[in-house]
Image (cartoon, grey):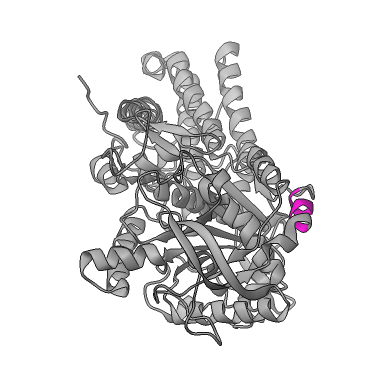
Amino acid sequence: MADENTPIYITTPLYYVNDELHIGHATTTIYADSLARFWRAAGHPVLFLTGSDEHGQKIFKAAQEKGTDPKSFADNIVGKIFELWEKLDITYDIFIRTTDDFHERTVQEFFRRAKERGYVYKGIFKSLYCVGCETYKTEKDLVNGRCPDHPNLKLEQLEEENWFFKLSAFTEKLTQLINDGTNRIIPSSRANEVLGKLREGLSDVSISRTKFDWGVRMPGDEAHVIWVWFDALINYISGLGWPSAHGLPSREIEGRARHESPTPAGFAPFPHWWPHSVHLVGKEILWHHSVVWWSMLMGAGIEPPRRVFAHAWWTVEGQKMSKTIGNVIRPLEYVEKYGRDALRYYVLKAGPNKEDADWRAADFITKYNSDLANGLGNLVNRALNMLHKYFEGRVPAETSFAEAALEGSRQGLITLVNGLERKLLERVAAFDISDALEAIWEIIRKANQFVDESKPFKLAKDPTRAKDLAASMYACCEVCRVLGCAIEPFLPDTARRIREQLGIKEGASLLDGVGLTQMIAKLDGQPKQASKQASQVLLHDSLRWGLLKAMHEVGKPEPLFARIETA
């Protein structure tokens, strides 16, 4: 993903405010939040941006239908977005709205620079237009004469004087970028799809409208508003204060951050963060976030982002998710019923990370019961209950088994724990969070199997096997400590509860007891990572065997996940 100490700038798309957000929007954001939390835990400075896309014809029409103005309509939806991200505990550093004054000024400056460089011109535009996508369509894009993503919407025939962007000038450069060996588009299958379309050639794209006025005014030609995509994509750099702001513009607006990563003193945000940018998007908008956006950036003299990860889609019980069908999954309904970590787990483990995934209510319950209640929850609960029963809640000193088979099982757990950091780093770097969770759950399964094999409840009845009982209980508790660290980026509430039950002070999080005196130090007059050894200190010094001290007193065990009873 990045060399140690390298900043990482993670973004989601700006979500369109035509309706409340559904599980697809939550999926992208949970992926981004988990990546942000993970790389912070790996010692990297991370900046995380999300926000709302509020301009365009679709919002204009939706507001008219509701009998209100577009800004009031947008404000209502944005309020619900803030609520959803709070309920899901999304730790964004920047929330940007395309109606923010600083963003609108940046869009106009971007347009001026692209025009000065000869990539913007005026002409007559004729095209089919899908309001649902806010995108132009050609005949080859259509299925039975309709947009395949919005078959119930009639395409509009547009003909008007417009401003155009010379997208056609970038075919060769785009092809070179995608083939440069740096994995700019992940997964590779989607990079191949983009390359296939590039071979068909690119046409210039209209970037202005005159039939409605809900958008950013075209500088020097205010009869036009800027096309919603041209406007919204620029948020990734306007949020950093491009071209020359010395601080993040959103920091001047109250309530726009749930986490705050500092930009080092003496550095402007854009040159510090932008070279390490990672866009997370759904596959349906990859074209805009690769071909269109990268061309726009090159047209304005800016290097394209480092990487774009495009995940797939959810279906629901085998059908496309649709308001018409009535099968839209609302994230808050699941959060209120099962808790946000249950929702996060299902999204991260069973979601459309690589290929389309099918949301099934029965599968959600099955994974909740098997992986969370019976797997992780059962392991932590019985380990701590037995520790209270046999050792008065105090961790015994680590020791080994006399029996070779049991000692082999204990050593197997130690090997898995000590190898976990490497597995997580590799899998998260490849954007494969599902496999990262699988590496954690491999330890959970092995640990539950270890309890069944070592049978501490039997060992406790035999005074001659006191050493074996201590070996079993230390191993069980140490695995629980490691799990309380390893799952934090993915299931933060559950990680906190595990640490509480283990008697690890909250607030210390992964830094507690690892001998780290200072995460950030001033070197050469600038805040940087404290040392080479500290670059992955949170993972490195937590995900290793043997940190629980003898006689450490644990807290009160309580079930982490109540099993869901089904018929």
Q: Residue at x 31, y 55 (%)?
A: 20
In the picture provided, is 382 more to the left or to the right than 130?
Answer: left
Q: Is residue 269 above or below residue 127?
A: below
Does the segment drawn in magenta span residue 443?
no
Read off the magenta span. Answer: 173-178
Where does residue 546 sit, x and y in percent of width and height?
57, 38
Q: Residue at x 41, y 79 (%)?
A: 253
Where does residue 303 sit, x and y in percent of width and height?
72, 66
Q: Residue at x 32, y 56 (%)?
A: 84
* Image quarter of the C terminus: top left
Q: Residue furthest bottom?
A: 220
Does the segment drawn in magenta span residue 177?
yes
Say which of 72 and 494 sits in front: 72
Say which of 47 and 305 sits in front: 305
In the picture provided, is 514 more to the left or to the right than 556?
Answer: right
Q: Residue at x 56, y 67 (%)?
A: 125
